[in-house]
Image (spheres, rainbow, N blue to C red):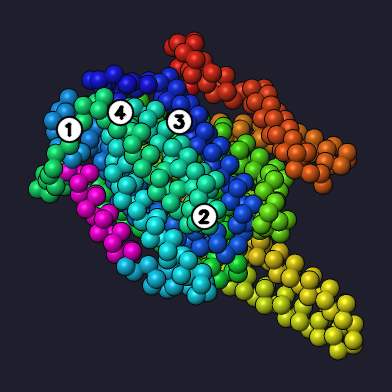
Amino acid sequence: MSDNPPPASPAQASTRSMARNTIILMIAFATAKAISLAQTFIIASVFGVGDEWDAFVTANRIPEQIVLLIGGGALSYAFIPVFSSFLARQDRAGAWQLASSVINTVFVITFALSVIGFLLAPWLVEHVVAPGFEADKIDQTVKLMRILLISTLIFSISGMFQGILHSHNHFLLPALAPILFDVGILFGVIFLIGPFDVYGIAWGAVLGSIMHLGVQVPGLVRYKMRWLPRLGWHDPALRRVVVLMIPRVLGLGVVTFNTLVFNNIASRLGSGAVSAFDWGYRLMNIPETLIGSAMGFVVFPTLAALSELGDEANRRRAMSGAVRFILIATIPAATGLILIGRPMISLLERGAFDARDSALVYGALQFFAFGLIFQSIHEVIARSFYADKDTFTPLWTAVIAAVVNVLIVGGLYVAHVYQVEDTVQKTFETWSTQFAAGSYPAALDVLATGADEVHDALASVTGVGGLALGYSVTFLIELGLLLVILRRRWGGIDGRALSRTTQRTVAASVVMGAAVLGVDAALGAIGWHDAGVLITAVRVLLLAGVGAAAFVVAAILLGVDEIRSLPRLVLRRGGRAALQEV
C-alpha cells in the first residue's frame, strides 16, 4: 500500500500490491462484520423478527438511499476517475479545487434532501416504503427515520473522504471507517437500548457516522488536502464529474426503486417479513463485503488510471485477476451459506428470536446466497465501465434488470397471496368442522397448525424467499449484459481463464459440499442436530472448517492456480514468478 506523499500513480499499482490491499480491506471488513455479528446477536435476542425491527429497517431505507445516490455511492464512481486524472498529471492544486467543489456541492444537496425527507417522513412511510404497516408502527418508523437522517449528512462528507483516499491508493483508514461505524452502533445496542429502546440503535448509528468521518481526517492531513469554500459550479472539472454522475444516479435510482418495491411488498407479508428479508441480506452481505466490495474498492483506482493511460492489456489483466479472485472465494462461500445457513441462523434463537423466525430468515438467505456470486462480480465489472468514464451502459442494463425483477417479484407475490389465502381458507373450514362437532381441543390444534403453515408460506419461494430470489436475479441479468458488452468493447475479457477458474472452482465446491454433508450426517447421528447453543456453535465452526479444508485441497488438486499464488502475492514471496501465475 502506498501511504507516503507524493502519491504514486495508480497505474503503477502491481498485482502484488492489489492483493495485499485487498487482504487489508478483507481483514478490516471482517473486523467490522465481527462487530456487526455481535450487534446481530443482541438485536435478535431483544427484537427478533418483529414490529420494532421492521420499523428500524424500514426507517433506514430513505436515509440509506440518499447516501447511496448522493453522498458517496454514485459520486465516487464519477469522482475517482476525474480526481485520479489530476493526480496522474501531478496537478494537485486542480485536484483539491475539484475535491472542494464536490464536497461542498454534495453537502448542500444532501442537506436539502434530508430536510425534505424529515418533513415528508410520515407520507413516505405510509404511502411509499411501508403501506402495510399499522398506525403505531408508522409513527415509530417516522421517528427513527428522522434520527437516522442526521447520519446521512455526516456520510455525505465521509463518503467523499473515502474517495479521495482511495484515489491515492490509501485503503487503511477508509477500511477502519466502517469498523468504527459498527462500534458506534454496537455502543447503541449495548448501552442505549435500555433507556431508549430501538431508538438507541439509531443514536448509535449517528455516533458511528461521526467516527466514520473522523478516522479518515489524519489521512487527508497526510496528503495535505486543501479545502476551499467554493461551489465551483462553473468549473469544467466539476461539470465533468456531474455529467459522469447523472447516469450513475439514475442507475442507483433504479436500485432505490427496487429496494422500495422489496420493502413495500414485504410490509404486506405480515409482521417480521421486513426483518427476515433484512436478516437474510445481512448474513449474505458478510462474504459479499469481504470479497466483492474489498476487491472492487482496490481495483477501481487502478482500472481508472490504466484507462486514462490507454493501457488496454494491463487493464484487461487487472479486471480478469480481480474476477477470478472473486470466483474462487464466492462460489464456495455461497455453497457454505446454503449448507450451514440453517444451523448458523439457529444460533440467534434466544429471547425474541425463535425457530419460526429462523425458518423465515433461512427462506431468504438460501436465495440471497444464489446472488452472492453475481453481486460480488458485479462490483468489479460495473467499475470497469466507470473506469472508462462510461456510466450510461450500467444505467440501461440496470433498467432492464429492474423491469424483469418487478415482473418476477410481482408474480411471486401474487402466487404468495393465493397460497396464504388457500391455507387460511382450509384452516378455517377444518376448524369450523371440529368446532361444530364439539371437538374443542382438536379445533385449537387446527388453529395452531394453520398458524404454522401460514408462517411457512411466508418463508417459501412465494414469500420472503421470493423477494430474495428477485434481488439475486436482478444482479444475474445485469451482470450478463455487462459482460457481453465489455467483451466486445475490450476485445476480450480473458474468457478462457475465467471459464477455467469457474469450472474448477465449481468442481471443488461440489467436493466441499459432499464433505460438509457427510460430516453433518455423522454429527446428526450422535445427536448434535438438536443440541444446545454451544454444541450448535461448535457444529457450525466444525462444518465451516471441514468445508474450507476440503475446498482448498480439492482446488489445488484440480489446478486452481490462484490458490497457490495468492499467499506468495500477499507475503511478497516468489516475486515475478508469482505474478506470472495470476
- Secondary structure state at the residue bearing disc 1: loop
Amino acid bearing label 3: Leu
Image point (71%, 64%), residue name: 456
Q: Nearer the viewer, mark 4 or mark 3?
A: 4
Residue that badge 3 annotates: 25
Q: Could you tell whether 137 is left or right of 510 in the image?
A: left
Q: Is residue 577 magenta?
A: no
Please rate how many residues cluster around mark 2, counting C-alpha atoms within 10 Å: few if below 14, some from 14 to 19, many from 20: few
Q: CA distance from mark 2 to mark 4?
A: 36 Å
Q: Earlier in the sequence, mark 4 or mark 3?
A: 3
- Residue 224, compared with residue 573, is above or below; it is below
Amino acid bearing label 1: Arg
Q: Are marks 2 and 3 in contact (CB under 8 Å)?
A: no
Q: Nearer the viewer, mark 3 or mark 1?
A: 1
Q: Earlier in the sequence, mark 1 or mark 2?
A: 2
Range covered by the magenta-colored residues: 101-118
Q: Which mark is residue 226?
A: 1
Q: Are marks 4 and 3 in contact (CB under 8 Å)?
A: no
Residue that badge 4 annotates: 219
